[in-house]
Image: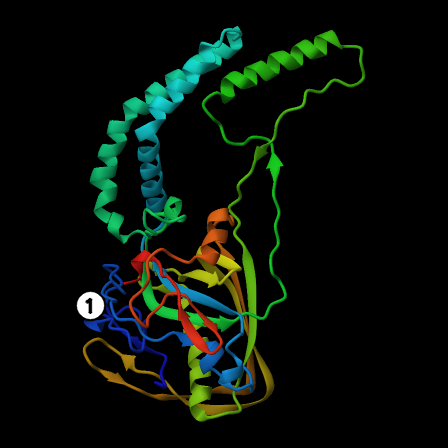
Amino acid sequence: MANNLWSLVFGQDGTLPVLIRTGSNVQTDQINYITNTVYNNLKTYADDINVVTDFPWTKSPKSSRTDVPRLVLKEKRIKTNSTISNFAYSVNTITDIAKTAGKVVNAFGTKIGNTEDASVITKTAGAAVSTAGTVISETATVIEDVSNTVIDAIADDYENFGENSVLTPYNGLYRLEKTGFKYIFPYLDDNYRELETSLGDAGQQNLISDALSKVNDIGGQAAGALFALRPGVYIEEAKQFAMTQDGRSITVTFPLLNTGSYEEITRNWQLLYGLVYQNRPGRITKTLVDIPVMYEAFIEGMLYMPYSYITGIKVDFLGNRRTMSIDLPVVGSAEGDNAGKKINTVIPDAFNITITLRGLNDETRNFLYESITPGVVTSRAGDSEFSATAQGEVVETPAEIDFE
């Protein structure tokens, strides 16, 4: 077991040291924050940072930890700002709609307009639908041209879960690259699941909303005139389901004991420093900032979040504390001026770590299904994306397409 979990090295630009997982093949002479090439050449993945089995969070032997629930976090760096990502995602969405919307909307409009008992209002709505369908069809070519010339050039860099996955609707929502870090934490929290569903006024304008609003106004005015002297006049309206932008939130809490070997103490400190380092922004120039990382999160049978971020990390000292000399990993430049060093830092009897993770998307059925059937393609031998442990053996589970 290698002592160091990571190295801090400068790239060609010399602006900010990059955290590199020990055992990965990130080539320091190709790192450049200015040109946004940091983990681009990552091909070889190191072993998981498995706190459940390899860190001193309990005095129980490793053989007794096989049934401990575990949270798996795959770390990823955001490469493109949300404005560009949203533009690309929106264009691809419109392109997808344009391929079928013309026929579907026109058919719907014709069906409404040709109904034998259709009123004038209904026929007006049908005409509006048909007109909208024609507009969508006519813009399909323009949108596809934009997609081909602007979006397709960078499409390969966007997160892609494949075309045969329940996660396909989320393809391209973010442009990410893997950093080579994957964590496995014990999940001992009491919270299993909280669910809230909201039905309210329709906030999304659709093809016939304007026509229907006129119908509602006329109906309300007619009812008010007819029952002007009655104390209660109210027309019920069907409610619209409301999607939210708030994802699920979970909290992980565990200790790290510093009463064992010097190697364990060093690895504990490195784990905490690396987590905090990657989840803070980094100033590159007066105008450029590298933002904190994101995570793909998984608890088998319980949780799956394709896009999540750490909202808070809290580390408390427990017991006595003392100043200790800790070996730092390699720190230096890409030109080879690398030398390990020691620092004197505060080490308590134990750290108590609390990590709060929040998803960036409303929890849908897609995520629930993915939590019980992760991915559609099996990863290469001995290197699973999400592994579960049963009866002392590691069970290889399917991994998502873009792992290799």
Residue 377: % across, % down = 32, 58
Using a 10 Å C-alpha cutoff, classify the residue at mark 1 as few (fewer than 14 neighbours), some (14 to 19) or many (20 or more): some
From the viewer's perspective, is residue 96 above or below residue 315? Answer: above
Q: Which residue reaches farthest front?
A: 391
Question: Residue 259 vs residue 11: left or right?
Answer: right
From the viewer's perspective, is residue 90 above or below residue 365? Answer: above
Q: Which residue is at the front of the view, 42 or 81? A: 42
Residue at the spot 42% in from the left edge and 83% down from the top edge: 267
Residue designated by label 1: 30
Q: How is the image coloured?
A: rainbow
Residue at the spot 49% in from the left edge and 72% down from the top edge: 185
Residue 7 falls in image quadrant:
bottom left
Whether residue 162 appears in this view of the structure is yes
Residue 367: % across, % down = 47, 52
Local secondary structure at mark 1: helix
Residue 58: % across, % down = 55, 83
Residue at the spot 48% in from the left edge and 73% down from the top edge: 390
The residue type indicated by label 1 comes to Gln
From the viewer's perspective, is residue 330 above or below residue 278? Answer: below
Quadrant placement of the C terminus = bottom left
Residue 60 falls in image quadrant:
bottom right
Question: Residue 88 vs residue 55: left or right?
Answer: left
Residue 207: % across, % down = 45, 23
Residue at the spot 31% in from the left edge and 57% down from the top edge: 401
Q: Which residue is at the front of the view, 46 or 333? A: 46
Question: Residue 218 vs residue 98: left or right?
Answer: right
